[in-house]
Image (tube, rainbow, N blue to C red):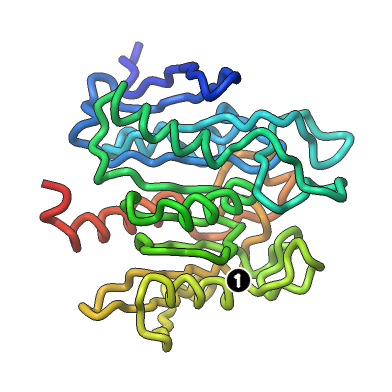
Amino acid sequence: MRTPLTTAQSFEMRVGDDVRRYTMVSAVGGDLATSPVIVDLHGSGSSPEEHIAVTAAHSLAERGAVVVLPRADIPFRLLPEWPTGWAWNVPGSPLPGESEPRQEPDDVMFIGELIVEVVQRHGADPSRIHLRGYSGGARLSAHLAARSGSSLASVCFVSGVRFVDGVGECAPVLAIHGRRDHLNPYDGGAGSRWSESVESAVQRWAGAVGCEPVPTVRAITDTIHAVDYRDSTGFAAVRLIRVDDAEHAWPGTRDRDHISQFGCSGDLDASQAHLDFINDVENQYTDSFR
């Protein structure tokens, strides 16, 4: 029998009066102090367990990353016939099917305290915390990046990039989005919930990061294009990867249930693309990660 190379451990933590939960995927015997840590927020109606499978988190752990997956706390399902999962409380944004934003739970506070916990309890390097979110998790990540972007090593939005006002000093940004996304359309125009286009939102992040306003566009393949916004050193500190043959599914996933719910996943391996971006960021700022 093959000895497992990675492990998934479940933890609880108290946030105010609530007990919140998260899962950590890491290499067996791995050291958080010397690893990049991805705090990964699942999509609406999902869970850490499901998101681990969708994103191939164990594969990332085999390649040296630690993936921390907090669980949202609002029971939610996108469609009546789908399993019940969990949804985030995104500030100012009602859940699908609801007319008013919720006041609780405070998920921005939860993720902020989770990052502190990962550093203080588990020994992670605070300069190597990379935030990532998918769909509804990406929307919440925008608020976290706006409030504490300078304390993050990078931010990644998958199938859900939004820009929020009040962004201060900001970390490098990667956005990955399917051109055929039907839930969060690439061109926007889906009412107040999703009015801005993906390209417009990314351009505004580029401005917040301090990049040049005109990007360079390069074809990775016939169906995958990278839009790079470069900072004053020439580094692509903000990058949009457009996947022309992907719908709302996590690009590159092989999870059949996820694909049946959210459509074609396309040719890009989003998990690997994100890890490549993390490596680029950490190599660019080598002194910060020594």
Residue 269 visible? The answer is no
Secondary element under disc 1, as helix, strand or loop, is helix
- In this rendering, the answer to whether 152 lies above or below 19 is below
Q: Give coordinates of residue 36: x percent, y percent.
A: 28, 41
- Where on the picture, by quarter, is residue 168? bottom left
Residue drawn 51% across the image and 72% down it: 202
* Residue drawn at 54 percent across, 42 percent down: 108
Numbered label tally: 1
Please name the residue shown 75% across and 58% down the image. Answer: 183
Left or right placement of residue 210 versus residue 144 in this view: left
Q: Which residue is outermost to the bottom? A: 214
Residue count near mark 1 (Cα–Cα under 10 Å), binned few <14, some 14–19, many ≥20:
many
Residue 195: image x %, image y %? Answer: 73, 71
Identified by mark 1, the residue type is Val
Res 153 visible: yes
Which residue is nearer to you in this view: 179 or 238?
238
Q: Quadrant of residue 73?
A: top right
Q: Quadrant of the N terminus?
A: top left
Q: Which residue lies furthest to the top in this view?
A: 1
Question: Image height check: is 132 above or below 197?
Answer: above
Left or right: residue 192 versus residue 264 is right
122, 241: nearer the viewer: 122
Residue 126 horizontal/vertical position (percent): 26, 40
Would you name the residue on which mark 1 appears? Answer: 198
Instruction: Answer left or right for 208 relative to 198.
Output: left
Residue 30 horizontal side relative to residue 14, left or right: left
x 34%, y 18%: residue: 4
**Camera-side residue of 113 and 176:** 113
Which x, y percent locates residue 87?
69, 37
